[in-house]
Amino acid sequence: MTDLWNTLVYYFQFPFVQYAMIVGLLIALCSSLLGVTLVLKRFSFIGDGLSHVAFGAMAVSASLNAVITIENDMIVVLPVTVLAAILLLQTSQNAKIKGDAMIAMISVGSLALGYLLMNLFSNSPNISGDVCSTLFGATSILTLTLPEVWLCVIMAVIVIAVFLLFYHKIFAVTFDENFASATGVNANAYNLLIAVITAFIIVLAMNLVGSLLISALIIFPSLSAMRIFKSFRSVILCSAVISVICAGMGIILAILFSTPVGSTIVAADIAVFILFSILSGVLSRHEKA
Amino acid sequence: MGIQLQCKDTALGYDGRVVLQGLNFVVSEGDYLCILGENGSGKSTLMKTLLGLHTPSRGEIQFCGDTSQKEIGYLPQQTIVQRDFPASVQEIVLSGCLSRCGFRPFYTKQEKQLAGEIMQKLGIMDLNKRCYRELSGGQQQRVLLARALCSARKMLLLDEPVTGLDARASHEMYELIADLNQNDSVTIIMISHDIQASVNYASHILHIGGRQLFYGTKREYLQSKVGQAFLEMGGVMHD
Ligand SMILES: Nc1ncnc2c1ncn2[C@@H]1O[C@H](COP(=O)(O)OP(=O)(O)OP(=O)(O)O)[C@@H](O)[C@H]1O
Ligand SMILES: [Mg+2]
């Protein structure tokens, strides 16, 4: 036990480990805040589609890098993902086009084209390593530079601030969109806001868990919280706490046992979900008795 | 008496299929308008169009004067809330105050107080912290009515408000609405199958069925052919 503790203390002397912890916790917080709304509005599939788009954008950025130097992949990835978010939202609201088929098309399409582009143009010596790292996060959270950390912190702060400022409106639009627009709240604008923040979160979270696992980060904490809590606010608070704790635990365990960070965090989220499911079963039986 | 809402030769429909046409009526400040008609005659569609949730296939419906949509309360006929939506009664009722907030990110003390008073009036104060989805149908209806009352400053639109309420609660609801109409001069537009109550409380009647069959004051309606036929069918006695 003391051995583990000593290893941990030793690792946390390194700035890159500290960065990973700070950024990881912030990303976990952001994704859980919006997760509840995304799950309830049935937007979680948009999150899933977007994460694949982000992968495609990442690949485009990497291939462009062969021609011109791009300081930071986010310059390409963020606008593309935001655009895709707006597009997906619009199509999902248009009942005449099959929204889910469209999303499946976009998401699988970006995966395929992204991988193709990477193979054709990338001058990296280890393409499958790159791909694996973009898909599963692998170690990218542990290789952040200081400017990248700042960028993440700023983006996270923006997401949290927007969420807090518009909290009541987001609740109203999530609970009953018709009533909100009937009483003069611009529901479409808030839907757009939600989609754009989701894009931000996904681009952020790619660093932490990789694009394939982002949905897990968004969905699991809110589903766990919804098992036990019954008001909107308590569900959001609880899912934020769950998400932050799981991310912290996941990062620490990943460092101690040198497991991949992303999947360790998601494993922790799944464990909490199972725990909460059992707990809610026990609670409801208790109530009946 | 300023005109608040105007509807000129308007037709409503879905995907090119006309449901209701020839609509011509005005709603003035302080009116109590009851909309009557059979199932499927387009009452809810009309109300949704008034609220801008649905676009008319011909003509337009507009708010006049200083009436803005932010001062309207609305009780839908059906609110489809997801089975597992976590929301407490208080959160839902308060969300009716949202249109008063503008860009302010929180509710003021007065707004919370108002919500409290309305919940008191509707007898749902003790449900305050309860989860909406665990309430009975009638309790849910009262919660949504409370939300509508929170946002209604100038106008209140109700789509079959007493569905699911017991006799006493319906009576109290009608009295509450009438009180709001008379003392706070809130304009009421109500869809109802309860002919007796409509005749008792309304100042104006709009009767529809494919097209506009009648629009006028209650007195005119009671003397009209349409009105008498409908009332006889409903078995309502009047003097
Ligand atoms: N979303 C929709 N798409 C297509 N047609 C619709 C839609 N909603 C309603 N309709 C049709 O429009 C007509 C009017 O419906 P509406 O709901 O306005 O009736 P209503 O007068 O409110 O009836 P009720 O008394 O049962 O509430 C019906 O024939 C219905 O089939
Ligand atoms: Mg109806």
Image: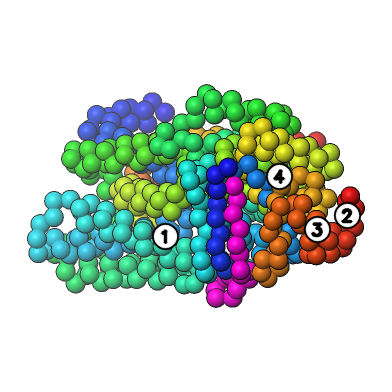
Q: Which numbered disc, 2 or 1, marks the residue closer to the eye?
A: 2
Q: Which numbered disc, 4 or 3, marks the residue closer to the eye?
A: 3
Q: CA distance from mark 1 to mark 3?
A: 53 Å
Residue B128 as seen in the image, left or right of residue B162: left
Is the residue marked by circle 2 packed among few (<14), some (14-19), or many (20+) residues within 10 Å? few
Of labels 4 and 2, earlier in sequence is 4
Give the labeled residue for mark 2: B236
Q: Magenta stretch containing residue B23, yes or no?
A: yes
Instruction: Check disc 3 and give the amino acid type.
Output: Gln
Is the residue marked by circle 3 packed among few (<14), some (14-19), or many (20+) residues within 10 Å? few
Instruction: Check disc 1 and give the amino acid type.
Output: Leu
Main secondary structure found in the magenta portion: strand
In front: A218, or B92?
A: B92
* Residue drawn at point x = 36 percent, y = 28 percent: A5
* Residue drawn at point x = 57 percent, y = 40 percent: B154
Instruction: Check disc 2 and give the amino acid type.
Output: Val
Q: Which numbered disc, 2 or 3, marks the residue closer to the eye?
A: 3
Element under label 2?
loop
